[in-house]
Amino acid sequence: MAQSPVHAGFPSPAQDYMSGGIDLNRELVRHPEATFYVRVSGDSMRDAGISDGDVLVVDRSLEPGDGAVAVCCLEGEFLVRYLRFGGKISGGKPSSIVLEAANPAYKPIKTGPGSEFSVWGTVTWIIKKVE
């Protein structure tokens, strides 16, 4: 009788490299208490590789820099855009923030002192379905 079992199927060359499941929270989230997921609706960031239906990993604990992709709330609505900072005022904060889409069909949006605007968090990962 053989010492090892006989497999009744096709052997998988990847089986030797399997080490258990992948925990996406462990892989993608640095600050669990400040991270959330959002699903994208629309095509305003298509040229940045962000498509309708993608899931974004957003970290609220990170200070976004100029050019960061961020989830913002403008006049009560959430949107994802590049942040572009204007001139500096006291304390090193920008005097204006322009929200720039990655699709030429959308015009930049300039925020100002009268705007109801906040940055909710910085996008750190894009999770997308590949078909």
Image (cartoon, grey):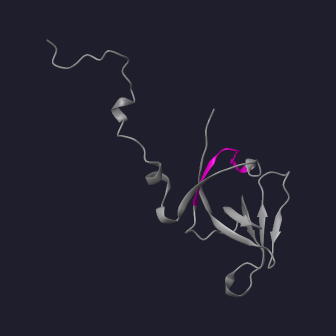
Left or right of 105, for residue 130? left
Q: Residue furthest front?
A: 76
Between 72 and 130, the one nearer to me in the picture: 72
Q: What is the quadrant of residue 13 in the picture?
A: top left
Queried whether the magenta region covers residue 111, the answer comes back as no
Instruction: Left or right? Give the position of 90 relative to 106.
Output: left
Whether residue 97 is visible: yes
Front residue (pair 52, 95): 52
Q: Which percent across, then down, holds residue 62?
A: 57, 68
Q: Quadrant of the N terminus?
A: top left
116 with respect to 29 (left or right): right
Residue 4 image point, x, y percent: 19, 20
Residue at 43 percent of width and 47 percent of height:
23
Vertical relation: 69 (above or below) 63: above
Q: Residue at x 86, y 58 (%)?
A: 107
The spot of residue 66 in percent (x, y) is 69, 68
Question: On screen, 121 above or below 116?
Answer: above
Q: Residue furthest bottom?
A: 90
For image coordinates 73% across by 78% down, the residue present is 94
- Quadrant of residue 99 within the rendered picture: bottom right
The magenta segment: 48-58
Identify which residue is drawn at 36% across, 21% down.
Answer: 11
Image vertical order of residue 76 relative to residue 46, above or below = below
Residue 53 in the magenta stretch? The answer is yes
Residue 31 seen in the figure:
no
Image quarter in which the C terminus is found = top right
Relative horizontal placement of residue 64, taking residue 2 as reference (left or right): right
Task: Answer with the quarter of the image where residue 81 lies.
Answer: bottom right
Where residue 45 sits: x, y (%)? 74, 51
